[in-house]
Amino acid sequence: MAGGGILGTWHALELSRAGYTVAHLEADAAPQGASVRNFGLIWVSGRRTGVELETALRARQRWEEVGATIPGIGFRPSGSLTLATSDGERKVMEEFAAHPDAAARSITYVDPDEVVTINPAVLGEVFGGLYCTDDAVVEPRRALGALREYLSGPSGPSGPSGPSSPGSYAFHSGRRVHGVEDHALVDTAGTRWEGDLIVLATGAGFDQLPGTERVAARVRRVRLQMLETEPYAGELTTALADADTMRYYPAYEVVSQDLLGQQSPVAAAHHLQLLLVQRADGGLTIGDTHAYDEPFDFALVEDPTLELLDRAERLLGAALPPVARRWEGVYAQCTDGAVCAREELAPDVWLVTAPGGRGMTCSPAIAADTLVAAGVG
Ligand SMILES: Cc1cc2nc3c(=O)[nH]c(=O)nc-3n(C[C@H](O)[C@H](O)[C@H](O)COP(=O)(O)OP(=O)(O)OC[C@H]3O[C@@H](n4cnc5c(N)ncnc54)[C@H](O)[C@@H]3O)c2cc1C
């Protein structure tokens, strides 16, 4: 197993449960990729009808199961509110809520009074919203470590209280894979790692190994900007989104979006939407922007940050605490609409990558599907 992000870690867990002894290689001293830079949203609401939604629902169930066993993941089934700040946005939301696709995602329309009942921290002027009870949150900067600890520990899959014949697990940081052979990987130190089944989950580095050209032809990188505030005094009982998310998430393609009106110039230039999640320590994770053309800017730019902060303050109807940190993140995404790219590069060596902006959500189900594709699940 190579790649210490969420996709690699869920594969390690499923392989261990299936009885494999797992050696888990990570290039860096600790995983620093998209999996620790995201919102931690287990986001069912925006998923495209069909295999994408089905994958997300399966994965969400698995997150909940494992979250109950591993509190360190910080799983919270808190749901989400997507909020309207104009009459046009409210009408689009009401139309979506009346569509059968809304019920498939546990989404209902709620009026402004109900919004405040569900999430008393929303004190700004809102016209209504979509309430999704299936959406959930995990703590992205703690989840990987918590899963690895579980895998290695006495009460995890390798211990006596795990599944019937689980395999043992060892994490090896600082091991960068650069060669792929039949049933084996070779790292830059020259160590050859043999296995009955090998999975490469190298995230946005999908094109840095030999034999990955076919996958690279149907995958692109996307760069996002994010920020986090100091702890917020109030408690947010749900994640929040604004109506611009309806422009990006495929679930909403079933309704006409004309009434959403024009995006602001900053939002249009940066493909911006507001997503807001309260962390377990009270800080607010706020994003995001999307850039699709490489080479990406190396700098974090201020215009979208200010717009996001302004939008968040308007929804909460309160001043935000100071920004504590800003960062960028890059994920890999299939350009053909597939949930992920999964290809056998050499006998029993699989590359699995590019779950896009839904990778934190879908990783458990993607990992289970890899075992099926490899004929062992
Ligand atoms: C800012 C941001 C916000 C997001 N928000 C959400 C969200 O809220 N919900 C959601 O569902 N999804 C979200 N996503 C998407 C999600 O984070 C990604 O799809 C997911 O984390 C991808 O996981 P991964 O394991 O494939 O990649 P990564 O997390 O990038 O992990 C890949 C790992 O492989 C290692 N690696 C690379 N090359 C090698 C090599 N040659 N040898 C060994 N190791 C190697 C890297 O060091 C890295 O640790 C977001 C993404 C970003 C960037």
Image (cartoon, rainbow, N blue to C red):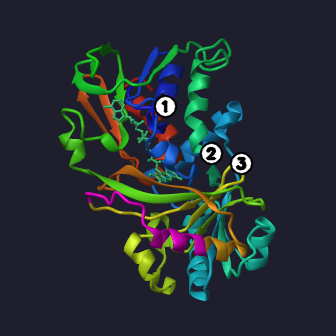
Q: Amino acid at mark 1?
A: Thr
The label shown at residue 19 is: none
Q: Earlier in the sequence, mark 1 or mark 2?
A: 1
> Residue 181 in the image: x percent, y percent?
22, 20
Asked where in the image residue 298 lies, by quadrant, the reply is: bottom left
Write down the region rendered in magenta.
Answer: 294-310
Secondary structure, mark 2, is loop
Image-based side of 113 in relation to 86, left or right: right
Badge 2 density bin: few <14, some 14–19, many ≥20, Cα 10 Å: many
Judge whether residue 108 can be spotted in this image.
Answer: yes
Indicate left or right for 349 with 20 as reference: left
Q: Could you tell me if residue 362 is visible in this image?
A: no
Relative to 315, say whether 373 is above or below.
above
Q: Which residue is mark 1?
A: 9
Q: Which residue is mark 2?
A: 138
Confirm if mark 1 falls within 8 A of ligand 1: yes
Under circle 1, the secondary element is: helix
Nearer-the-camera pick, 363 or 223: 223
Q: Is residue 305 magenta?
A: yes
Quarter of the rendered image showing ligand 1: top left
